[in-house]
Structure formats: C-alpha cells, structure tokens
C-alpha cells in the first residue's frame, strides 16, 4: 500500500485548464495541487500512452473512481458478477498505474432490508478481496458514502463492512452525508464527530490512510440532486477543513465541485492558512 504523510488535495479528473494527461500534472504543479482522481465513469479503459503519462507523474498522488454501473445488490446474478468485475478492474488499474486508493458507489437497497444488504456486501466484498489477495494487489478498496436514501452506503454501514477486511476502509463523501441527512452534518462539531467516530470504530489507520470527497451540493428530502460549486451551496467547507486539520488527517481529499481546480485550490489554500 502507498504510504501518505499529509493531506493531499486532488482534482476529480484532469484539471479543466489542461489539454489532457500530457500536461495535466504540469498544470497541477502550477496550481500547487497534489494529484487527481482518475474517473472510470463508463468502464476501466486507458491507452498505453495515458499509462505512460500517469506513471511519469513525479510526486503526485493518484486515486481511482470506479464505473457508475456498479450494484453489488443487483437482483440478477449477471449484474452482480459484472459489478464485481468492475471493482476488480478498477483495483487492477490502480495497481498498474500506481494509485493509492479506489472508490465506488457499491449498491442500491432495491427495497431490501438494510441488514440483508450489509450481509450481501460482506459476502460479495469477500469475493473481491480474496481475488485481489491471490493477485498480490493490496490497493485500498473504498466503498463511498452515498447521497441518496435509495443507495446503500451510510457511514455506519461502510464502517461495519470495513471491520471485516483489513484492505477496506470507507471513502467519506462529506457532501453526500450532508445531502442524505437533509442538511445535517455541516458544522465543525458534526465534522469532528464523523472523524472521531471513524477513528474510534476503525482505529488510527483510518485517519492516517484517508480517502474523502467534498463538493458543494444541491439536495432535497430524498437526498443528493447534483454537485454545486461552494459559492452556490450551503456546504460549510471551512468548518470541514478545520476539523480535518484538528485530527491531522493524512490521505486524499478529492474536491468534486463542477469548477474542478478552483474549489480544490480554495480548500488547500484555506487548509494552509490555518
């Protein structure tokens, strides 16, 4: 596993000011940002040329976001098998490209009892982890906290899953938690609660090997609608940054705001101003 010694601020994909991967890392350097999350939206595909450019990224940190077509609680066996393959393919790409961590939206409830779905998540993640161990792949596997009430993936659900596997930790999307809870978890004390709860349940390893997402967000009583820039959202990013600083969090924080590098830089600049 890749070791980290600070909180790294990453863009969600190639910065908008970059042409492609050929100058993405140069632009990140100019912006004083720490890396990016490679987003495999529709499938895990990349060219040999892209591979070479990512591997020549100097000291930048890389994470991966798995394809959106993942549902480990699907009704059909073929969809479950395809979902397992997409997680595995993302992890294999992470090993190939030297990534620190992967994340993905794991499942929908589809009307099933949450406890039943948790049991299925444990069963299906065991398949994933067993295969990765056979392949000598120790990349961090991170189901993401989800923003809609129809999606499996509350903070406590992912913590419970993580307790069963040494290679799994949560990816905490603070904006998703805020949206799912209809505006809660938006103060310094609430952000501290999340981090303290994470450490108490999973240990210091979860605070020293962190992977998180943040953005402005629009939501209804059903949860997340879409991401926004911080300026257009009620998300209290300053209190979040203060909490992350207080707990000396180390790892990756990906800013998924639509303006990509602008809000990512706002976060990093504020962090280092404290």
Image (cartoon, helix red, strand yellow):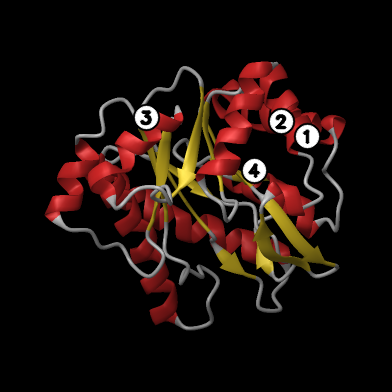
Query: How far across and how far down the image is residue 126, in percent?
Result: 44, 53
Residue drawn at (72%, 56%), measured in percent from left and top? 217
Residue at mark 3? 29
Residue at mark 4? 159
Instruction: Tell me if residue 269 comes above or below residue 87 in the rendering.
Output: above
For this rendering, which residue is in front, 28 or 54?
28
Instruction: Estimate the spatial distance between the alpha carbons at disc 1 and disc 2, rounded to whole Å.
Output: 6 Å
Q: Which comes sooner in the sequence, label 3 or label 1?
A: 3
Residue at mark 2? 195
Instruction: Tell me if residue 239 comes above or below residue 139 in the rendering.
Output: above
User: Pointer 2: residues within 10 angstroms few (<14), some, or many (20+)?
Assistant: many
Q: In the rendered structure, are the residues bearing label 1 and label 4 in contact, judged by CB atoms less than 8 Å apart?
A: no
> Is 20 left, or right, of 115 in this rendering?
left
Query: How far across and how far down the image is residue 73, in percent?
Result: 55, 71
Q: In the rendered structure, are the residues bearing label 3 and label 1 in contact, judged by CB atoms less than 8 Å apart?
A: no
Instruction: Estimate the spatial distance between the alpha carbons at disc 2 and disc 4, rounded to whole Å.
Output: 12 Å
Q: In the rendered structure, are the residues bearing label 1 and label 2 in contact, judged by CB atoms less than 8 Å apart?
A: yes
Residue at mark 1? 191
Image depth: mark 4 or mark 3 in front: 3
């Amino acid at each position: 596993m890749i070791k980290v010694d600070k909180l790294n601020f990453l863009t969600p994909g190639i910065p908008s000011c970059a042409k492609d991967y050929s100058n993405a890392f140069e632009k990140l350097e100019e912006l004083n940002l720490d890396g990016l999350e490679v987003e495999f939206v529709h499938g895990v595909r990349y060219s040999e040329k892209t591979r070479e450019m990512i591997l020549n990224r100097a000291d930048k940190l890389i994470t991966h976001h798995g394809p959106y077509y993942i549902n480990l609680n699907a009704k059909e066996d073929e969809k479950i098998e395809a979902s397992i393959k997409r997680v595995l393919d993302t992890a294999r790409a992470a090993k190939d490209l030297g990534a620190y961590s992967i994340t993905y939206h794991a499942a929908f409830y589809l009307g099933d009892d949450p406890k039943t779905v948790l049991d299925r998540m444990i069963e299906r993640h065991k398949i994933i982890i067993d295969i990765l161990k056979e392949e000598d792949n120790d990349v961090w596997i991170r189901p993401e906290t989800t923003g809609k009430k129809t999606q499996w993936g509350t903070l406590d659900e992912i913590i419970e899953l993580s307790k069963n596997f040494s290679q799994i930790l949560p990816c905490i999307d603070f904006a998703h938690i805020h949206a799912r809870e209809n505006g809660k978890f938006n103060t310094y004390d609430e952000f501290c609660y999340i981090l303290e709860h994470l450490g108490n349940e999973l240990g210091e390893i979860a605070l020293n090997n962190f992977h998180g997402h943040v953005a402005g967000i629009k939501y209804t009583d059903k949860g997340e609608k879409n991401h926004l820039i911080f300026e257009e959202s009620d998300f209290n990013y300053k209190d979040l940054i203060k909490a992350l600083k207080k707990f000396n969090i180390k790892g990756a924080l990906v800013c998924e705001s639509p303006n990509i590098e602008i809000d990512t830089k706002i976060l990093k600049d504020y962090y280092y101003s404290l």
